[in-house]
Each structure stands twice: as structure tokens, then as C-alpha cells.
């Protein structure tokens, strides 16, 4: 694997490395949304959401399309949905391992 690919992956994962950005991507995985929709669904103030959307847009992970005076955001690549699903499965596997380890300690 060449250095460019490794750098791309490092930058890509760095762009995902924020809980609010992950939440925004999970919401966009369900369908395109405006900034106001995202704000109300995450229950976070507008400036925080806009800041995180800017990071995701700069890294070409989401795209924004003007719709009148609104901007509608969408995932640039639907494979992000697969990535989020795999991350959830890895989390669940860790959880199962931890629970089974705790069971052994307690028995």
C-alpha cells in the first residue's frame, strides 16, 4: 500500500474522529437533511453543527446542495453507511468480549 493511500485513510479517519460528526453521518445515512433538521435531531446548538458539517464538507465526506435559502446535506459516498455499520459491529464484539470477561471474573 502506498503512502498516499495511508495518508488518505489517516485524514479520513481523523475527519470522522468526533462524536457529533459521527452522529451527523448516522442521521444522513437515513436520508438527506437540512442544517435545521440535523440541529433539532442532535439537540445541539447551531454553531456546533455548522462547524462539524464544515469539517465533513472540507474532507469531501458530505455534500451540501442549495435549496432556496436552505442547504441540504447528503453523504458523498453511500459506503459511509457500511463503514458505520462495521464500526457498530466491532463495538458490539468488544462489548461481548468485555461481558464474557466480566462473567469469568464474577464466577
Image (cartoon, rainbow, N blue to C red):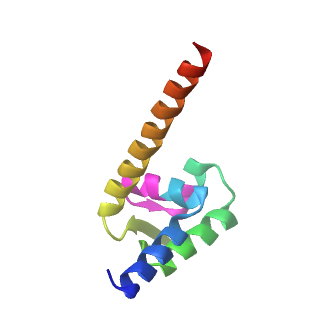
Q: Residue at x 39, y 87 (%)?
A: 4
Task: From this view, report whether residue 76 is shown above or below residue 102.
Answer: below
Residue nearest the observer in this picture, 4 or 59 = 4
Magenta stretch: helix, strand or loop mostly: helix
Quadrant where the N terminus sits is bottom left
Q: Is residue 98 magenta?
A: no
Q: Foreground residue, 15 or 20? A: 15
Q: Which residues are magenta?
A: 25-38
**Residue 37 visible from this viewpoint:** no
Residue at the spot 50% in from the left edge and 81% down from the top edge: 58
Residue 90 image offset from top left, x and y in percent: 42, 45
* Whole-percent x, y for residue 6 in the image: 41, 79
User: Residue 52 vs residue 58: left or right?
Assistant: right
For this view, does 1 lie left or right of residue 25? left
In the rendered image of this protein, does residue 69 appear above or below residue 19? below
Q: Position of residue 72 (x, y in %)?
A: 43, 67
Give residue 86's position: percent from left, percent from top.
36, 50
| Residue 5 can be seen, yes or no | yes
- Closer to the camera in the image, 9 or 39: 9
Give the image quarter of residue 50: bottom right
Amino acid at each position: 500500500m502506498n503512502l498516499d493511500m495511508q495518508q488518505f485513510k489517516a485524514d479520513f479517519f481523523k475527519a470522522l474522529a468526533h462524536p457529533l460528526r459521527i452522529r451527523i453521518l448516522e442521521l444522513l445515512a437515513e436520508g438527506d437533511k437540512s442544517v435545521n433538521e440535523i440541529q433539532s435531531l442532535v439537540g445541539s446548538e447551531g454553531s456546533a453543527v455548522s462547524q462539524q458539517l464544515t469539517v465533513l464538507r472540507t474532507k469531501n465526506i458530505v455534500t451540501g446542495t442549495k435549496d432556496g435559502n436552505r442547504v441540504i446535506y447528503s453523504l458523498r459516498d453511500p459506503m459511509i453507511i457500511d463503514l458505520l455499520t462495521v464500526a457498530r459491529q466491532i463495538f458490539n464484539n468488544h462489548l461481548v468480549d468485555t461481558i464474557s470477561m466480566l462473567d469469568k471474573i464474577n464466577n
